[in-house]
Image: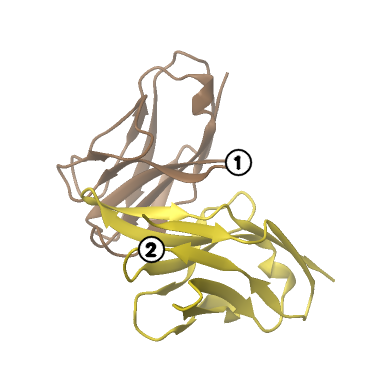
Chain colours: A yellow, B brown
Amino acid sequence: AQSVTQLDSHVSVSEGTPVLLRCNYSSSYSPSLFWYVQHPNKGLQLLLKYTSAATLVKGINGFEAEFKKSETSFHLTKPSAHMSDAAEYFCVVSAFSGGYNKLIFGAGTRLAVHP
Amino acid sequence: IAGITQAPTSQILAAGRRMTLRCTQDMRHNAMYWYRQDLGLGLRLIHYSNTAGTTGKGEVPDGYSVSRANTDDFPLTLASAVPSQTSVYFCASSVSAQETQYFGPGTRLLVL
């Protein structure tokens, strides 16, 4: 069975400092992994996805994530936080089972960015 | 290109009333989905449709029904709303059943 654990429910950083949002996954086969971002009162926007190509995945807005099979991790990073990055971030694993593509969401990490 | 639109943006509904949430996509995606988002529970799949004319049940289908008469539209109906259906509802679509899902802006529903 597939599952996702986001290790931090809240992360707070200062503007201009690096961002690290941690995600561990469990999957019985090579997974497809995603990071989505949700700004307050908005829908979910796809940041990036991993689908067994390059292990370092670059996304929008300067975010990237590295797939580490040995550590079953897919942490999201950004070198320099911007105020507009304040949002909730979801790590997601997909599993095609029972005739449909099931997205399994982590509980989310709320990122706060301080001036 | 609008992507996915949902209507209404928000709604307050009396318990027992019938309500249809609308979802339209203009990307010609074959697969569409309905999720609900609840605090502490993340997003859970209600119903899905892999292609026009077909639908299936997700994780939490009870109290909801869907139809997929054409490629673009995927309405979600609450036949008789209950307070536990208070939630934020997201529609999503993907090119095909195994491809990346893209989400609409959501509908906030309060059932009193």
Rendered-image quadrant of the C terminus of chain A: bottom right
Q: What is the three-letter code of the residue carrying label 2?
A: Ser
SS at circle 1: loop
Farthest residue to the left: give it.
B53
In the rendered structure, the answer to whether residue B84 lies left or right of residue A14 reads: left
Neighbours of disc 2 within 10 Å: few (<14), some (14-19), many (20+): some
Q: Relative to residue A77, is residue B78 depicted above or below?
A: above
Are the residues tagged 2 and 1 within 8 Å (C-beta)? no
Farthest residue to the right: give it.
A115
Residue at mark 1: chain = B
Please give the name of the residue rendered at 43% of the width and 54% of the height, measured from the top-left corner: A104
Q: Nearer the viewer, mark 2 or mark 1?
A: 2
Q: Relative to residue B30, is residue B66 depicted above or below?
A: above
Residue B33: x, y in percent? 33, 47
Query: Which disc, if any, is residue A86?
Result: none
Q: Relative to residue B80, is residue B69 depicted above or below?
A: below
Rendered-image quadrant of the N terminus of chain A: bottom left
**Most foreground residue, B31 or A52:** A52
Residue A84: x, y in percent? 69, 68
Residue at mark 2: chain = A
Please give the name of the residue rendered at 56% of the width and 73% of the height, measured from the top-left corner: A75
Residue located beneath label 2 in the image: A27
**Most foreground residue, B76 or A29:** A29
Farthest residue to the top: give it.
B16
Residue A92: x, y in percent? 46, 61
Query: Which disc, if any, is residue B39?
Result: 1
Residue B6: x, y in percent? 42, 44
Q: What is the three-letter code of the residue carrying label 1?
A: Leu
Please give the name of the residue rendered at 61% of the width and 78% of the height, measured from the top-left corner: A77
Q: Is residue B102 visible?
A: yes
Please give the name of the residue rendered at 24% of the width and 57% of the height, measured from the top-left corner: B97
